[in-house]
Image (tube, grey):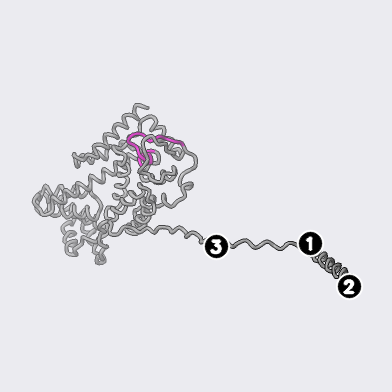
Amino acid sequence: MSQFNTLLGAAVAAALLSACAAQQAAAPPPPPPPPPVAAPVEAAPAAVEPVYTATPDLKPKERFRKAVKDLETGQAGQAKAELLQYLVDVPENNRRAQALLSQIESPIEEYFPPESFTVVVGTGESISTLSQTFLGDALKFYALSRYNGIANPSQVSVGQTIKIPRTPQTLAAKDARDKGIVAKPAAPEAALAAAVEEEEEEQPAAETKPPPARAVPKGTMERIRGMAASGNTDGAIKEIEANKLGAGLSTADATFVADTYLASARSLQGSNPALAGTRAQKAGDMYLKMGDKPDKALEAAQMASTLNPGGAGTQKLLTSAKTAAADRHYRNGLSAFRKQELDAAIKAWDKVLEIDPNHENAKLQRAQAVELKEKLSKLR
C-alpha cells in the first residue's frame, strides 16, 4: 500500500509539472522594457533683428551723404535709418532720398524686369557709373547691386560681369557704350558725387530754415505794389521800410521787394550812386537769401560793388552771389548732360566759366560734353 501511495504521489507531481510547463508555453512573452526617454532639447533662440538708429547731430546734407556711403558699403539697415530721419528733417523736395529708400524696401523683381544682358566693368567704371550710363541715375546703384546679388557695391572690380535689366533705355545705352560715345566720369566716384550734389541743390535751405512768413498788415503789399506800378518807386520803398518788410516775407513778396529796390538803384545810379549802391545791395541780399534767384542776386551785387565798393558786406555779397549762381548753372549743366542734351549742358557750363573762369569741374565737364558731341556728329 505504501508503495502504491508513493507511485501515486510521483504521478501527481509529474502531472502538475506538465501542466505548469504547458501553461508557460501558451502564455505570451513579456513586453520589452520601454525605451529610455531622451532629455528635452532646448529650442535655439530666435535671431534678433538688429535695431538701427539714425546718427545724432547730423545736418541734413551730412545725413544724406552718410546714407549713400552706408549703401555703398552694403549697410542697408543703417542707411534706411538715416534716410527715414532725413525725410523727417527735410519733408519736401526729397525725391532722391525717397528713391533710395525704395531701392532698399522694394522687392527687386518689382524694381527691374527679369530680362537682362551683361556687361563687363571696364577701367574707370564702377557700379554707380554703370547705373548712370544705363539707368540714367548714379544713385540707382544700390538697386542694380541687389539685382546682381552684390552685397557690397564698393567691391565691384574691373573685369567683373554685371547684369543689366533689358529695357529700351538700357539697350540704347549699351549701343552707345559699345560704340564708345559715352563720356566716362573723371573718376569712378564722380558720377555718384554729382548725384549727391543734385539732391543738395534741391535743398538749398535745408540746413538753415528761413524764418516763418510774418504777418504783413492787410493791404500793405497791395498798396506798395500799386505805388511801384504807377512809377512811385520811392514811395513804395518808404512803405517797405516803414513796415520793416524783409526777413520772413513769402518768396513772391520778397522777390517783388527785391525787384523794387533794384529798380530804384537803376534809376538813382547817375544822381545818387551811394544810395543806389545801398539799394542794390539790399536787392541782392533778398534775391539770394529769400528769392532763390542767384543770377538776379549777382546782377544786384555787381551793381552794388561798382557803385559802393567800400560798402559794408558788399564784397561778401558779391562772393556769395557768384558762388550761388555758378553752382546753379553747373548743376543745370549736369542735369542736361545726363539727359544727353549736350548743347544745353555746354551752354550752362559756359555760363559757369563766365562767372568763374577758374571753375575746374565746369572746364572738365564741358570738355567731355564737347568731345561726346563731336563723336556723335561723326556717326551721322
Residue 283 picture location, percent across and down = 18, 54
The foreground one among 216 and 319 is 319
* Residue marked by disc 1: 25
* Residue marked by disc 3: 39
Sequence-wise first label, 3 or 2: 2
Q: Is residue 248 above or below residue 259?
A: below
Q: Are marks 3 and 2 in contact (CB under 8 Å)?
A: no
Disc 3 residue crowd, few under 14, some 14–19, many 20+, Cα 10 Å:
few
Q: Quadrant of the N terminus?
A: bottom right
Residue 184 picture location, percent across and down = 32, 35
Look at the numbered disc 3 and give the secondary structure of its residue. loop
Range covered by the magenta-colored residues: 117-133
Disc 1 residue crowd, few under 14, some 14–19, many 20+, Cα 10 Å:
few
Q: Is residue 342 left or right of residue 161?
A: left
Residue 32 picture location, percent across and down = 68, 61
The foreground one among 297 and 70 is 70
Type of amino acid under label 2? Ser
Look at the numbered disc 2 and give the secondary structure of its residue. helix
Single out the mark in the foreground, 3 or 2.
2
